[in-house]
Amino acid sequence: MYPLFVCAVVSFATALDRLWAIVIATRRNETLIKSARDLLLKGDIDGALSLCADTPGPISSMIASGVKARNLAAADVERAMQEMAMKQLPLLSERLSVLDTVITLAPLLGLLGTVTGMIRAFHVVASMNSLGTPTAITGGVSEALIATAAGLTIAVTTLPVYNFLTERVKGDIGAMELHAAEVLNILATRAPGQPDEKPVSRRARFKTAPVQFKRARIEIIPMIDTIFFLLVFFMITSLAMQPMAAPKVHLPTSASATDRPQNKVIVTVTATGDYYVDRQKVSETDIRALIQAKVQQDPGVTVILNCDKDQHIAQFVRAFDLVKQSNAATVMIATTPEAPGGNP
């Protein structure tokens, strides 16, 4: 995370520096060009040079170089302005490569943090003492995910700033070429370079050296497989190391009956799934009402549940639940006595 923090600071500082430099270099260009054009058309060469000297920036330096070479041929004036433009252009695009480097480096540093987090998680798995503590694994996984998120955040926030600054520099370069052509036309028309050269009134097409800007992009392809494997690893290990504990249930106490109850109600579930209360065949919905009526008559009545051994256990559980819903104080389950040999 420390290298990622350095990348964030460098990106922020570089973006502010470049934005301020571009604004300072281009904020008075339109006023400069208009004033310089008026002075040159009036023939006030010293005034134009003084104006360029008082207005720092790449365009003023380029115009001043053309004005100083006004007595040369038009081609030489153009070369002088191009030479000055080539010196000034790097000042506009200076340190933009730092932002491009941050955009590429930050996701890779995040990937490095992902890998180190996975190594830490694997060390935890290899340790037998940590198998019962899932939080030991989640620490490594959290380290990996935080590093990846930080790297992507830095790259994502730096990318639009870099694209904005590069497009701004391209626009300034185009403006320099346009304004240089305007000044070159004025100089070529008013000041022929050689005695035998006639004044010309052509439209000059000034062109600076092409400046190539690398198109930055966020490298996330190496992260895809790693992050996918990390998530699968996290889910599998978390499930494997999490102790499976059922919720606590407080069940009523039970004991083997030794005495036969005198006042009792027998609920029988036959092999065919029929229900009987004592000897009366009833439906499933009537069991609770019948037993509740008997409990109201005698609160100490004992309910004996008798289920055929060939009946499914779910049928017995359903009958037992209905009996308990009737608020019977005592519920007994009839079982087959164990045979002397151990088999019922």
Image (spheres, rainbow, N blue to C red):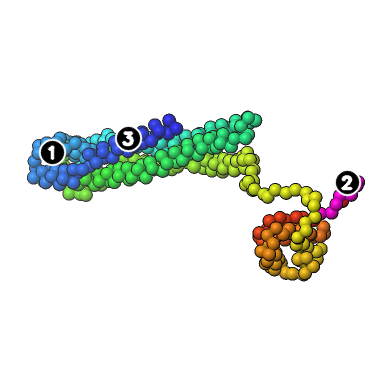
Taking the spot 39% from the left edge, 38% from the top edge, the residue there is 100
Viewer-nearest of discs 2 and 1: 2
Q: Quadrant of the N terminus?
A: top left
The secondary structure type at the circle numbered 2 is loop
The amino acid type, in three-letter code, at marker 3 is: Ala
Q: Earlier in the sequence, mark 2 or mark 1?
A: 1
Relative to 303, does residue 249 appear above or below in the rendering?
above
The secondary structure type at the circle numbered 1 is helix
Question: In the rendered image, which residue does mark 2 sit on?
Answer: 342
Span shown in magenta: 335-343
The amino acid type, in three-letter code, at marker 2 is: Gly
Q: Position of residue 132 (x, y in %)?
A: 62, 35
> Is residue 14 toward the left or the right of residue 302 in the image?
left
Q: Is residue 70 magenta?
A: no
Looking at this view, is 296 or 189 the one in front?
Answer: 296
Looking at this view, is 134 or 272 the one in front?
Answer: 272
Dot 2: few (<14), some (14–19), or many (≥20) neighbours within 10 Å? few
Q: Position of residue 16 (x, y in %)?
A: 30, 38
Q: Which mark is residue 13?
A: 3
Taking the spot 25% from the left edge, 46% from the top edge, the residue there is 175
